[in-house]
Amino acid sequence: MRKPEVRAAILAEPLPLMGDAFMDTIIGGYDKLYELGDPPNYEPAPEDSIAAMAAAAGVPPQQYCYDLMMKNDGSNVVYFPCFGYGANDLSRQVALLEDETTVLSLADTGAHCGVLCDASVPTQMLSYYVRDRQRGHRLALEQVVKMQTHDTARCVGLEDRGTLEPGMKADLNIIDFDKLQLEAPGIIFDLPAGGRRMFQGARGYLATIVAGEVIMENGKYTGAVPGKLIRGSQPAPEVARV
């Protein structure tokens, strides 16, 4: 794809529109496509769109998008917010997050691991919605921590974790909050038989502790495997209080 003749041939082809509004937006809706960037920007403004950037550069949007994807050795990511981005910001998502009936739950690193990585959600909540957001108000740190620990655990019947109390399961993340940052996503091929998955790393986690054992330290796996499969709800431990 780096060869000039290949690039010219591809750009000369008409867009393969399918007659479906959603799919055609992905293929040619350049006003709704953005460079994700590194660190990734999940709340781009209209002037950040490929259509706007191409117009500013004086080139066709298809050409701009092609060259954009060839950056970073062909691994650059183009971002298409599928749903809920009609206002061109995350105001609707913030409203949902602030609703008392909302529960944070997504961490889909299994069923659809070749196309997305929802395991980035907890880091994005803390680094962006709490600390970095500029296009609207931010959320309180203590509220987001509670949402991602206590509230999620209680929603699925896990009474033995989600708070820092004597007798509770010692699952902890120790975080350098100022350095907490998602990295750009990318495709890696480390599953059995060379299977692919979308992977998105993060910086700023000093340690991850499961059942009192450190399993990750400064982003490196320690080899510890204290976790275990659980089935059904887990009752709160009986703790004698003085």
Image: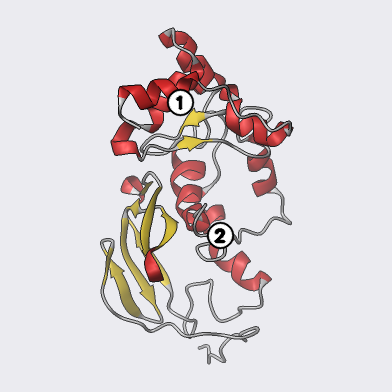
Residue 75 located left or right of residue 152: left
Q: Please determine whether, in this image, residue 214 is positioned above or below residue 74.
A: below
Q: Which of 68 and 1 is in front in this view?
A: 1
Residue 6 visible in the snapshot: yes
Please state which amino acid type lies under the numbered disc 1: Ile
**N-term mark: 2 or 1:** 1
What percent of the width, then of the height, locates residue 30?
A: 56, 23
Residue 24 or residue 117, whichever sits in front: 24
Look at the image and name its color scheme: secondary structure
Q: In which quarter of the image is the N terminus?
A: top left
Image coordinates of residue 181 in percent, x first then y, are: 37, 46
Residue at horizontal 53%, vertical 18%?
A: 51
Residue, disc 2: 112
Q: Which of marks 2 and 1 is in front?
A: 1
Disc 2, SS: loop
Picture quadrant of residue 132: top left
Whole-angstrom CA distance, mark 2 to mark 1, is 29 Å
Label 2 crowd (10 A; few <14 / some 14-19 / many >=20): few
The residue drawn where x is 38% and y is 84% is 226
Left or right: 63 with respect to 3?
Answer: right
Q: Is residue 29 above or below residue 182?
A: above
Quadrant for residue 195, please give it. bottom left
Q: Is mark 1 on a helix, strand or loop?
A: helix
Rendering coords of residue 24 (x, y %):
66, 31
Task: Give amino acid for label 2.
Answer: His
Toward the top, the furthest residue is 58
Q: Name the residue under label 1.
A: 10
How many numbered dots are placed on residues in this image?
A: 2
Q: Is residue 105 above or below residue 164?
A: above
Identify the residue at horizontal 46%, vertical 15% (top origin): 54
The residue positioned 62% from the left and 65% from the top of the image is 151
